[in-house]
Image (cartoon, grey):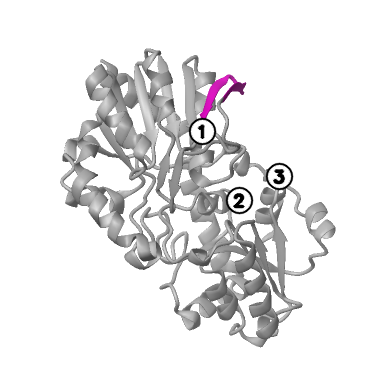
C-alpha cells in the first residue's frame, strides 16, 4: 500500500507523538509498504529526505498559536499530486488534521486519525480553554469525515462518543513500546558516569509546569528517614526557567544532595536509567498516555502516576495511582517503592506483561489490518 502519515513534528524533534509516528512508519516500510511522512520543518524551510526507508517531507510553518494551532498548509498542495491508499493523520485539533479530513472526502481517499489524547482538563489549557471549547463545538464533528478515529484507551473512547462521533468509527489503538526496552541493560556504567549510588526513583520526560515535577519534589521531601539514602533523578529537557525554579525548590526543601537533574538523555542512557531504578514517577497534571510508562514497565519497573486518559495503570496491579497535588499520598507511594521490595517486584512483573502485549510490532499489525479493511 501507499500510505501517508501526517504529523505536526517528526524526529529529530523529540516527543511521544513523534516517536509513535516514526515507529509506525519505519515498521510499515519494513513490511513492504511505501510510506511518506508529511510534517512541519523545524528550521522553516521545505526539505525532503529518506530516513530508514521513509520519505520525510517537511514544510514551513506559517503560524503557531499556543500548543494546538500549528499551521503549515502547503503540505496539502504536495499531497494532492500523489495517490495514496490511506492517509493517516495524527493529533486532533491541529488544522492539518481537519484539512486531511476534508481533502480525503473531496478526493475519495481513505483517511484515519489518531487523536493522541488532547482532552486535557481546562486548568491545563489555561487561557486557551475557551478556544478549545469553541473548536470542539464548531469542528469536533469533522472527526466523522474519517473512516476510523483511533482512541488511546477506553476513557478516550467515551470522550469521543460524548462528542457525537459515530461509535462504529471509534477504535482503541494504543501507542506502543519499542521491543528494545524488553532487553536487559547493565545500568552500572551509566550510573557510575553520573556519580549515582544507592537506590533511586526517577522522572523521565519534558521539563514543564504541567508535568508536576514541583509536586513530586515536595512529596519526596516528605518521605521518611528510612529512605534518606535514596535519591530522585529528574531526566529530560524543556522549559529552562522552570528548571531553574525546580533547582531552587529542591535546595529550599533540603534536597540538594538527594535530587539530581540529569538533563536530556539519549535512548540507550534512558534504558540504563530505567533498568537501575526502583520505580518511575509521572506526576503530571494530566497525562493522556505517557509512553515512558510503558517503557518503564517493559524494564519490569513499577510506576506511580496521576490518573489520565489511557487506562495504562491499574491500582496495586501494575502501578500506583495518586491524585495530582496529594503530597501525602504521593509520599506514601514513593516510600512503598523504596521500602516494600516484594510489592515493587510484583507491580513491575505485571507491568512487563502489559508492555509485552503493546510492543510496536503488535500495534502495527493491528493498524495494518485496519488499513486493509477500509481499503477493501
Which of these two is toward me, 322 or 336?
Answer: 322
Q: Is residue 249 magenta?
A: no
Question: Which residue corresponds to mark 1?
Answer: 60
Is the residue marked by circle 1 packed among few (<14), some (14-19), or many (20+) residues within 10 Å? some
Residue 244 numbered mark, or none:
none
Question: Which residue corresponds to mark 2?
Answer: 299
Determine whether 339 is above or below 118 in the image.
below
Question: Which residue corresponds to mark 3?
Answer: 268
- Point out residue 287 in the picture as x, y percentages from the top left corner: 43, 58
- Point out residue 342 in the picture as x, y percentages from the top left corner: 58, 67
193 left or right of 181 in image:
right
Q: Are marks 3 and 1 in contact (CB under 8 Å)?
A: no
Q: Is residue 54 magenta?
A: yes
Asked if residue 221 shows in the view, the reply is: yes
Please tell me which of labels 2 and 1 falls first in the chain: 1
Disc 2 versus disc 1: nearer the observer:
1
Amino acid at each position: 500500500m501507499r500510505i501517508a502519515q501526517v504529523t505536526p513534528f517528526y524526529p529529530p524533534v523529540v516527543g511521544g507523538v513523534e516517536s509513535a509516528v516514526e515507529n509506525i512508519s519505519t515498521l510499515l516500510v519494513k513490511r513492504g509498504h511505501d510510506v511518506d511522512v508529511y510534517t512541519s520543518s523545524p528550521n522553516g524551510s521545505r526539505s525532503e529526505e529518506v530516513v530508514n526507508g521513509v520519505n520525510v517531507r517537511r514544510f514551513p510553518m506559517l503560524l503557531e498559536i499556543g500548543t494546538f494551532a500549528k499551521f503549515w498548509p502547503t503540505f496539502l498542495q504536495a499531497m494532492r499530486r500523489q495517490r495514496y491508499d490511506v492517509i493517516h493523520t495524527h493529533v486532533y485539533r491541529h488544522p492539518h488534521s481537519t484539512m486531511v479530513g476534508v481533502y480525503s472526502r473531496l478526493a475519495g481517499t481513505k483517511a484515519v486519525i489518531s487523536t493522541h489524547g488532547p482532552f486535557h482538563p481546562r486548568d491545563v489549557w489555561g487561557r486557551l480553554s475557551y478556544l478549545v471549547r469553541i473548536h470542539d463545538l464548531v469542528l469536533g464533528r469533522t472527526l466523522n469525515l474519517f473512516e476510523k478515529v483511533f482512541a488511546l484507551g477506553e476513557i478516550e473512547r467515551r470522550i469521543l462518543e460524548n462528542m457525537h462521533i459515530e461509535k462504529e468509527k471509534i477504535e482503541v489503538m494504543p501507542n506502543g513500546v519499542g521491543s528494545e526496552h524488553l532487553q536487559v541493560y547493565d545500568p552500572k556504567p551509566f550510573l557510575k558516569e553520573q556519580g549515582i549510588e544507592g537506590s533511586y526513583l526517577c522522572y523521565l520526560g519534558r521539563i514543564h509546569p504541567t508535568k508536576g515535577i514541583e509536586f513530586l519534589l515536595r512529596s519526596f521531601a516528605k518521605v521518611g528517614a528510612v529512605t534518606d539514602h535514596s535519591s530522585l533523578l529528574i531526566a529530560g529537557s524543556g522549559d529552562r526557567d522552570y528548571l531553574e525554579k525546580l533547582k531552587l525548590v529542591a535546595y529550599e526543601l533540603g534536597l540538594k544532595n538527594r535530587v539530581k537533574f540529569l538533563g536530556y538523555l539519549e535512548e540507550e542512557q534512558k534504558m540504563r536509567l530505567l533498568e537501575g531504578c526502583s520505580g518511575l514517577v509521572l506526576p503530571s497534571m494530566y497525562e493522556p498516555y505517557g509512553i515512558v510508562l510503558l517503557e518503564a514497565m517493559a524494564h519490569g519497573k513499577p510506576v506511580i502516576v496521576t490518573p489520565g486518559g489511557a487506562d495504562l495503570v491499574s491500582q496495586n496491579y501494575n502501578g500506583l495511582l495518586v491524585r495530582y497535588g496529594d503530597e501525602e499520598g504521593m509520599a506514601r507511594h514513593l516510600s512503598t517503592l523504596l521500602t516494600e521490595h516484594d510489592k515493587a517486584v510484583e507491580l513491575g512483573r505485571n507491568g512487563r506483561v502489559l508492555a509485552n502485549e503493546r510492543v510496536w510490532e503488535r500495534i502495527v499489525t493491528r493498524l495494518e489490518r485496519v488499513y486493509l479493511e477500509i481499503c477493501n
